[in-house]
Amino acid sequence: MAHHDEAGIGDFVLLDQINIDSFMENLQVRFNAGKIYTYIGEVCVSVNPYRTINIYGPDVVNQYKGREIFERPPHVFAIADAAYKAMKRRGQDTCIVISGESGSGKTEASKIIMRYIAAVTNVSQQAEIDRVKSVLIQSNSILEAFGNAKTNRNDNSSRFGKYMDINFDFKHDPVGGHISNYLLEKSRVVLQQPGERNFHAFYQLLYGAPDAELAKLRLVRDAGQYYYTSQGGNTRVDSISDRQDYKSVSAALRLLGFSSEKTDCIWRTIAAVLNLGNVEFDDNGETTTVSTPERLEAVGALLSVTPAELGKTLCHRVIAAGGEVMEKGHTGVQASYGRDAFAKAIYERLFTWIIQEVNSAIEVREESQRYRTKNTVIGVLDIYGFEIFNNNSFEQFCINYCNEKLQQLFIELVLRQEQEEYSREGIEWTNVDYFNNQIICDLVEQPHKGIIAIMDEACLNVGRITDEMLLEAMDKKLANHRHYSSRRLNPMDKELRHGEEFRIRHYAGDVSYNITGFLDKNKDMLYQDFKRLLYSSQNETLKSMWPEGAQHISKTTKRPLTAGTLFKNSMIALINNLASKQPHYVRCIKPNEEKSPVLFDRERVRHQVNYLGLIENVRVRRAGFAYRQSYDRFLRRYKMISQFTWPNFHGESDKEGVKILIKEQNFVDDVKYGKTKIFLRSPQTLFKLEQARGRLIPHIVIFLQKMWRGALCRMRYRKMLAARTILHAFRRYKLRHYIKQLNTLFRNVQRSPDFGRSVRWPPAPLVCRGAVGHLQAIHLRWWAFMVLSRIPADERPQMRLKVTAADALQGRRPEWGAGRRWQGNYLASVQENSNTAGYVQSLSQLRTKDRFQKIMFSALVRKFNRNNKMAERAVVVTDTNIYKLDAKKFKCLTSHPIADVTGVSVSPRSDQLAVIHLRGGNDLVVALVAAKAEDRVGELVGVVCRQYSASQGGELRVLVADRIQCMLGNKAKTLTVEIAPDAQFASYRKGATKDAIALVWPPHLGPPPASIANGVKNGNGRVH
């Protein structure tokens, strides 16, 4: 057991002296320090703190998940994890037995254990596993509402025994469960001792249901108005919020799949019991009648039976004898007894039905068993603790018998097996004596001689047998039993009332029982009339709880087993079930009777320690050896304190390594070597080992951190390398796959009319998305080559000009002459120029003078000059200059090098306006004139742009706008175009302002409309 810097000793086995005083001192020190858990080896002792402690959160769960029990401070989580690990590692069913007297915290311990199991399972986050875990946890609130009650010892006392099996699949996730209940204290429904309450469900309904719901259920919001909830005189409890609990129970019922009809039936039944308790009778000596008809009518409505039938069943009894059926009336006392028996039976059937419905919600589904060969389960037992009241009756007798059986199991599996372990390991030692309570179990359950057998015999006798006669029979048959006594057997014992009480010396102490009511409770008799009544109910859910009501009145049935025998059989089956599993124990202790978080009643606690056999448990655990551990685990924990075993021992066996370690530390005289385990005699040896280990742990942690960080970096680097390799391979695969797709799509495009231009490219993967543009550019160049290869060589210069013009005007001017053949030198044609000879002669002179190579474009124009006058001129564009000529004799008027051009502006319409911007502040503003109505603006723009690019190596700015800015005589002018249907020829006029000029353009001079949506056509009609 490791040190954990906490108060006291975390394991009682490690106490220096083993006696009751040392045990009590250590337990009190830890309780005062807020340490409510302490170990006895692998048994957890839990002291009820009576306050909320923050030691159950997710961070604490992670501290205990997967850890050995001795690695962390004592905690009930460690017991739950040990049971879970045992189930996982060995595939063995395990169980956790929680025992202790009423109010010691057993129910809370069971809920904590279930929450821990839910927290450490379902790492894969499966929805079905989450559903099962939620159902298992939420079922607790339902069972507590209908099975728990406030007693004088405990505000939330379990008044029934509960054993839950949690089923796990092959991944060790919970897939279902099953709940078994034992001996509900149904007498509490009709009778509570002073200071106590009925079951929680009654008060939750009265104080938590809405007003409308209460009115529908014929109830008022006052538990003091109902006989069955007011006898204890304590209808409210400070530590319980009935209103909030009602909401929690309603939510849990919905989560578990209870339909609204079933939920309504539950609360209607509870309301019926409350109203039934207020039904009173009037006995006039001859007949008995119901004196509270309004209550009778309310009960009938809630149970869905007629008030007449209900009243008849309460006041009369039908008897079948000798084949005849007769009706017998009850006395007032008998009617009241029948009413109470009816109320107890209704509640017990309801509780049993609720358990069945909960089991249906959490049962293992078929799909969860598909791949399973064997169920593995963890059982959690939360059963009533040992009880000693001022008035102990049949229920306390059964409860204390149950605790005797559990103590016997503890003796068998812990104390006896502890000593047998030494024998198996070949360790010499002296046996430790302990009290074996088998004699008390035999006193209760032995056939023909035990108390239960005597009660059954009395119930079978013909004639009127009273409780006093039963006590007399017990005194005769048990007179020589040293654990049984009565006033008749021991006349000097003044504490026992003659003819009413007997005493049993239980392992937990002497308990006196009042024999009154033992026979009736053991018979557990309910008139058949009540069963037939509820079987006839119109409520199908309520009807299903009473199947035996279908039997005819004259049909004889076998006498049922008594309540005592049924409970004895269930206890024997429970013990056999627990014995078949690997047990883990939580022993709960109640520190005081005042439910105080600071009071530690030493005498009260000492009594519990004694009757739980905790001192014997420590002595057996410590008898000669305070600590034992398997060789592999011992070596794994302490190998760092020896240079011969650190970091790994490579000898023949773990046992040899342990011997070397012990010898080096000089502990040879304080240990024994078993066949599979090492045994340490004194706790001081273990402390020294832990101290030596504790001194080295910080250095080892630093070393491990260094190594782990290095390992993480190396793993990360290897992952990065692997990821890069995978990524490269994947990229290559995606690229090859994409290329194959393209190869398939473009396989025969050279034979298609458009050379694959209409083929839709597939979506590119991310790896080659950047290269797709290059591939498309390659295809586009090939496509252009294929198109151009069909164009004759003499037409290619014209095509280049059209491409240049398209780059400048496409999408900006709808018509620019793309669909016609471009001649270029129009003035050399007689159709355009009647004086071709003069034109040719003039240009020859200019060629000789300026040495240009070729005439690229020539046309007649209407020019607007800086003097605001229009003149007819000719414009000639060569490979070096732009000339303005006289329109008649073609005399050169001005010459501008291509380098002086700064831009070209045209309008977006079909007019032939063109402005060539020049350096020097005097632009060339012209309107092209053609013999035929055709657009030559695009040709002019293409020639000027191409020649500029060829000579200057850059792109010329081309502006397309409705309003064109130009310079004439170093003055800025704004040029617009006006369409004049009445005009005969193009002309210029002044605009609205002195700086405005308007070109008046007649529509008939414009070119015919042409669509260029399908591409640019050359002179041969081919598509570009």
Image (cartoon, grey):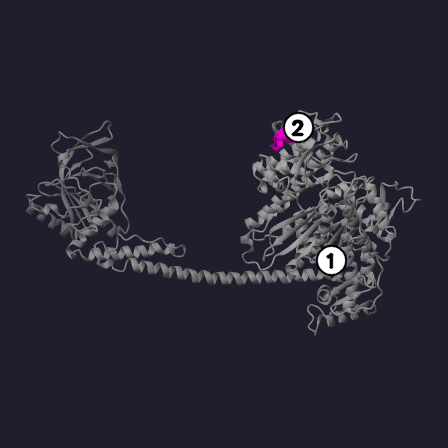
Seen from this angle, which residue lies furthest bottom?
A: 652
Instruction: State the residue lying farthest toward the right.
Output: 492
Residue at position x 89%, y 45% from top?
488
Q: Which residue is mark 1?
A: 70
Q: Can residue 1 be spotted in the picture?
A: no
Which image quarter is the N terminus in? bottom right
What's the residue at 86%, 47% (across, down)?
A: 475
Q: Give yes or no for contact between labels 1 and 2 (Cβ–Cβ under 8 Å).
A: no
Q: Quadrant of residue 375?
A: bottom right
- Residue 472's mark? none
Quadrant in the rendering for residue 915: top left
Q: Is 645 in the magenta?
A: no
Is 299 contained in the magenta span? yes
Residue 767 in picture, x, y percent from top left: 41, 56
Residue at numbered disc 2: 296
Looking at the rendered structure, the number of numbered marks drawn on it comes to: 2
Q: CA distance from mark 1 to mark 2?
A: 63 Å
Q: Which x, y percent locates residue 124? A: 56, 53
Q: Is residue 939 above or below residue 263?
A: below
> Residue 875, can we see it?
yes
Q: Please state the extent of the stretch shown in magenta in the rendering.
A: 296-310
Which residue: 28% across, 48% down? 955
Q: From the viewer's perspective, is 951 left or right of 568?
A: left
Above or below, 501 against 293 in this view is below
Q: Nearer the viewer, residue 664 or 365?
A: 365
Image vertical order of residue 949 relative to residue 299, above or below: below
Q: Which amino acid, mark 1? A: Phe
* Image position, residue 349 (x, y; %): 66, 40
